[in-house]
Image (tube, helix red, strand yellow):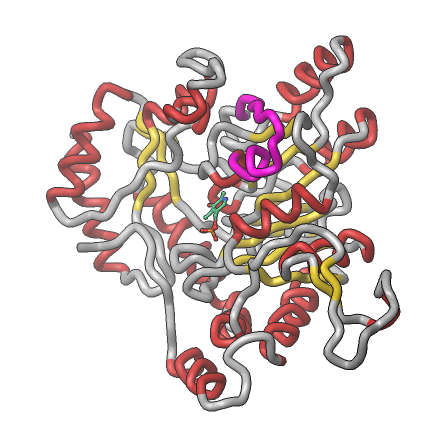
Amino acid sequence: MIPYSRQDINEDDVQAVLETLRSDWLTQGPAIEQFEQALCAHTGATHAVATASATAALHIACLALGLKAGGRLWTTPNTFVASANCGRYCGAQVDFVDIDPRSYNLDPQALAAKLADAARTNTLPDVVVAVDFAGQPCDWDALGKLKQQYGFRLIDDASHALGSTWNGRPIGNMPAADITVFSFHPVKMITTAEGGVAITQHDEIAESLRLLRNHGITREASKLQQSSHGPWYYEQQSLGYHYRMTDIQAALGASQLKRLNEFVKTRQQRAARYDALLSALPLATPWQHSAASSARHLYPIRLHDISQRRRVFEQLRQQGIGVQVHYIPVHLQPDYRQFGFAEGRYPQAEAYYAGAISLPLFTRMTDAEQDEVVARLTEALT
Ligand SMILES: *Cc1c(COP(=O)(O)O)cnc(C)c1O
């Protein structure tokens, strides 16, 4: 089986984990801050708050930006459910904005139109979650302008996009984004097994994120609201969660992060090779924005003839090619239909989904494996 994605763990990564296992700290030790600092150095951001998952990071990101029961969160339907669920954890209403048919990202024009409508009915969103799908950055200039005009808060769900850049700036450092979230699940750009991070330039937001990650508890003398009872004293100042990452995971993450540039380069070479090998087939290869460099987390193709998608997918799977589909539009999930969403609501996301297949792409993929994928796909389509 050629998997659609696979982690890349080398001997340095193994050693980093073993050293942590033999150290005094399995959790709440120095490895977490070291990983956070390395993420700041990589992105140029000032604060990084490592978490148990990207889903946890999205949840506390929404809370730190003030999303409350009765509030509104908008996101793209072409994403993993977590980008929308974070709003519901806060009791907010979730709505979607259709995608741009070229980038498959939330369409700034559709967003502008929806915002203009919402302004008229006084139903503007509190938070917008934009997703850099497949590693392809959103149009952060256009999103920034709309944010300025309408005053919502903006989260970059960059679970796919560690190592991507927009106008030469690393994702994680978009001036328009209040918070950026990365995922370290094994299929993502680097891994900590499970894990995520929330990154921000803003001191107060970072402080909220740290409190929310750790039960709402602080021990810092300067922040106490009551007088200390003694050296053991701590205060719960708000309702937080246990969303911490372990030192074992952080050590793995820091070791993996050193290899990120190499991972991105390899993925970009593989993607370029797919572009060339697939150019004559009846399908669209992933379009790239001229201001962007994608880390190429996924390689989603779109068949011209959507009536062939299921057969092609099944045939490839039977032949040991680990294809996937990213994504079933979130609004068509049963748990979202209860809010009145149905087919036809976001036609671009639905049309993209109907023809979408993600081809295997991972750092250790060989030319022979890639040739096999292309040969089987060519066979299936001709
Ligand atoms: C993977 C993913 C998440 C969730 O990441 P976890 O670390 O598994 O919680 C969220 N959003 C997107 C777009 C993802 O791909």
Instruction: Where is residue 14? Give x, y as percent.
Output: 39, 81
Residue 170 appearing in the image: no
Instruction: Where is residue 262? Give x, y as percent.
Output: 49, 68
Kindly indicate the quadrant of the structure image that contains residue 326. Answer: top left
Instruction: Where is residue 212? Give x, y as percent.
Output: 67, 54
Residue situated in front as seen by the camera: 190 or 64 = 64
Left or right: where does residue 367 sit relative to residue 164? left
Kindly indicate the quadrant of the structure image that contains residue 27. Answer: bottom right
On-image quarter of the N terminus = bottom left
Left or right: where does residue 170 sit relative to residue 97? right
Magenta span of residues: 85-99
Q: Is residue 231 magenta?
A: no
The structure residue drawn at horizontal position 72% and vertical position 46%, both measured from the top left corner, is 64
Kindly indicate the quadrant of the structure image that contains residue 88. Answer: top right
The structure residue drawn at horizontal position 82% and vertical position 54%, both measured from the top left corner, is 204
The answer to whether residue 185 is above or below residue 34 is: above
Instruction: Where is residue 33? Give x, y as percent.
Output: 65, 73
The structure residue drawn at horizontal position 45% and vertical position 24%, both measured from the top left corner, is 336
Q: Is residue 90 magenta?
A: yes
Residue 32 appearing in the image: yes
The answer to whether residue 206 is above or below residue 253 is: above
Query: Residue extending furthest left?
Result: 318
On-image quarter of the C terminus = top left
The structure residue drawn at horizontal position 15% and vertical position 49%, both measured from the top left corner, is 320
